[in-house]
Image (cartoon, rainbow, N blue to C red):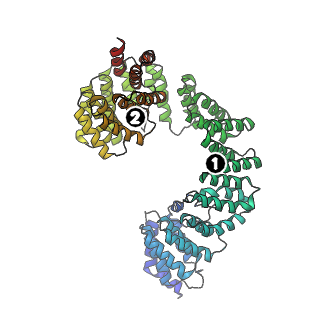
């Protein structure tokens, strides 16, 4: 009997194959080739995916095939392999990586060296991965996968000089796909901390390929990463000269121009689209930039062009619909959303919810109710039914609204909390502040550290002049969630508005502003506390910024009051009356108008 037959008959082999077939743990796979620079984004372990039981069985067969270099497949060797694989199955990647590395050194088999590399990467043992990858390349010198993995590991280890010859070899061998490889060059190097060193390396690597637009784009990316704005712009312009219709190049040129001026970036994209109207990726980038600049009408036009070219793209149709809502073109919004429902859209409940909102906005309450009530599960379930309840309350059916919310079956704990919040908000809008507070307090009795309930209960307590509860709840919330910007803001605003602890209040609001610098409500709080401290001009600046971002009625109340204090009484009156026209039931506006105008 041969040694291989004896091994096959031993219980350990049968046992291990059964374990491999029955294991439920994720196991690191053997990778079979990957694109150039596959591990470009420094997290090398992300390559690994779970290995199926069939794949594990094939792996055993491969190593049992008897082709190990210069060494017979004896029981010790196979036993070590199987123990290493069992360690992988049980998540002991450090043991498995070392076992595979020892096997690779013993056998100098490139398959085992590759496996050792992959297991070490999956377990994030980079030193072992580097050693295994070196052995892998030494035993399989023509392997692109080995070379690219080792190069990426050197880059991750901040050893650019060691990576350089490997990168040069891979680029030289890449032939017809050199453009793709050059395009991936900077992403591979981008996380290296020495951006000037990266720039120098990219300059060397792309020298033989300067006739390629991708080479100039790689150099432009490296230049921008090193804060060499002029060089980046020059290189990307050279790339576009070599390939005038290149969408990736155009998008990067806009990115570079955006460092200097958003207007210049938008103008460039607009001119590119005028010359290349079919450039859909650029049009999409241009449209998104318009949204960022809150140019919703222009953005809607660009998305509509994309939709005209791709009429069955439901994502584009939804975007056109939501932009139409932004510009109050509700007819177009409703038409598009109804069309999307016939397009097998990935989230039909969200579409139904938006259709409910549109009809609620138009005061078509029966139609809105139809859409809201059609949502019977999912993320929009509680939100949609809460909107339905609020509509009932607006029609004087408060008891029916509460009963509807209480009759819903929450699908998880988060929805249970949402329902409590919605019922409390119903009562707050009905100006029954005590009942609103009672609902939230009851929820807190069951879950005293529930963040959303702590926050909402604090707001309800403020309406009852229970500043002690406001402060206690918000301080507890800050302990539980130190980065909760709104908790700091609410505490600071309450102290600024209801106490004389103004410097303390300002400190809380400043911290909130650090956490969320452009939040209009935090800007409003900062303006208010500055005003209360006697810094009227500074307060006005913050309030104007807040109101520009969000013309909320309570921000309008504060802005008008500070304008009045500055002597601009006509301006203050206009701010108040414009806000009151759209929000006649707002308490803060009513108070300030009564105080100053009546």
Pinpoint residue 156: horizontal percent, then vertical percent.
54, 64
- The answer to whether any part of residue 188 appears in the image is no
Q: Residue at x 65, y 44 (%)?
A: 251
> Residues at badges 2 and 1 in contact (C-beta under 8 Å)?
no
Q: Residue at x 31, y 36 (%)?
A: 503
517 or 294: nearer the viewer? 517
Q: Secondary structure at mark 1?
A: helix
Foreground residue among 48 and 561:
561
Q: Residues within 10 Å of mark 2 (few under 14, many from 20)?
A: many
Residue 272: image location, x then y, percent: 71, 38
Of residues 203 and 25, the one nearer the viewer is 203
- Residue that label 1 marks: 229
Query: How many dots with numbers?
Result: 2
Q: What secondary structure is found at the residue carrying circle 2?
A: helix
- Which mark, residue 522? 2
Above/below status of 64 relative to 528:
below
Label 2 or label 1, whichever comes before in sequence order? 1
Residue found at the very far top of the displayed protein:
598
């Amino acid at each position: 009997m041969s040694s291989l037959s004896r091994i096959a008959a031993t219980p350990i082999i049968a046992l291990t194959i059964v374990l491999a077939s029955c294991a439920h743990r994720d196991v690191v796979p053997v990778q079979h080739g990957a694109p150039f620079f596959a591990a470009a984004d420094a997290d090398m372990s992300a390559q690994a995916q779970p290995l199926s039981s069939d794949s594990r069985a094939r792996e055993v067969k491969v190593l049992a095939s008897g082709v190990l270099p210069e060494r017979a497949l004896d029981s010790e060797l196979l036993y070590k392999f199987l123990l290493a694989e069992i360690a992988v199955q049980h998540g002991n990647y450090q043991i498995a990586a070392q076992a595979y590395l020892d096997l690779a050194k013993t056998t100098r088999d490139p398959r085992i060296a590759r496996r050792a590399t992959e297991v070490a990467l999956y377990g994030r043992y980079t030193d072992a991965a580097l050693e295994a990858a070196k052995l892998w390349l030494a035993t399989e010198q023509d392997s692109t996968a080995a070379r690219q993995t080792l190069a990426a590991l050197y880059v991750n280890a901040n050893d650019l000089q060691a990576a350089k010859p490997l990168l040069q070899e891979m680029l030289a061998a890449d032939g017809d796909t050199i453009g793709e490889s050059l395009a991936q060059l900077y992403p591979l190097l981008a996380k290296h901390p020495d951006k000037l060193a990266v720039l120098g390396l990219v300059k060397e690597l792309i020298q033989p390929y300067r006739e390629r637009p991708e080479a100039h784009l790689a150099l432009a990316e490296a230049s921008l990463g090193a804060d060499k704005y002029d060089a980046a712009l020059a290189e990307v312009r050279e790339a576009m000269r070599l390939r005038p219709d290149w969408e990736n190049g155009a998008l990067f040129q806009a990115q570079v121009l955006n460092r200097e001026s958003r207007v210049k970036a938008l103008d460039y994209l607009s001119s590119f689209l005028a010359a290349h109207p079919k450039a859909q990726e650029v049009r999409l980038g241009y449209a998104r930039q318009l949204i960022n600049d809150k140019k919703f009408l222009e953005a809607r036009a660009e998305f509509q062009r994309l939709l005209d070219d791709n009429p069955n793209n439901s994502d584009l149709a939804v975007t056109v619909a939501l932009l139409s809502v932004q510009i109050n073109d509700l007819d177009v919004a409703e038409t598009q959303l109804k069309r999307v429902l016939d397009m097998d859209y990935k989230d039909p409940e969200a579409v139904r919810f938006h259709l409910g909102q549109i009809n609620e906005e138009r005061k078509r309450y029966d139609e809105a109710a139809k859409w809201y009530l059609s949502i019977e599960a999912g993320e929009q379930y509680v939100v949609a039914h809460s909107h339905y309840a609020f509509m009932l309350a607006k029609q004087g059916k408060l008891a029916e609204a509460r009963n509807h919310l209480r009759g819903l079956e929450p699908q998880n704990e988060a929805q249970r909390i949402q329902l409590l919040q919605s019922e409390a908000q119903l009562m707050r809008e009905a100006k029954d502040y005590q009942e609103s507070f009672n609902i939230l307090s009851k929820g807190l009795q069951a879950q005293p550290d529930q963040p959303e309930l702590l926050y909402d209960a604090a707001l309800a307590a403020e309406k009852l002049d229970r500043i002690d509860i406001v402060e206690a709840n918000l301080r507890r919330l800050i302990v539980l969630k130190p980065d909760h910007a709104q908790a700091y803001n609410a505490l600071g605003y309450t102290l600024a508005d209801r106490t004389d602890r103004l410097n303390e209040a300002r400190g809380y609001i400043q911290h909130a502003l650090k956490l969320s610098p452009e939040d209009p409500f935090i800007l409003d709080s900062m303006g208010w506390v500055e005003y209360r401290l006697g810094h009227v001009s500074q307060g006005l600046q913050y309030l104007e910024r807040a109101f520009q971002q969000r013309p909320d009625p309570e921000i309008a109340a504060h802005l008008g009051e500070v304008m009045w204090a500055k002597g601009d009484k006509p301006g203050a009156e206009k701010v108040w009356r414009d806000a009151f026209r759209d929000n006649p039931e707002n308490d803060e506006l009513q108070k300030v108008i009564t105080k100053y105008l009546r």
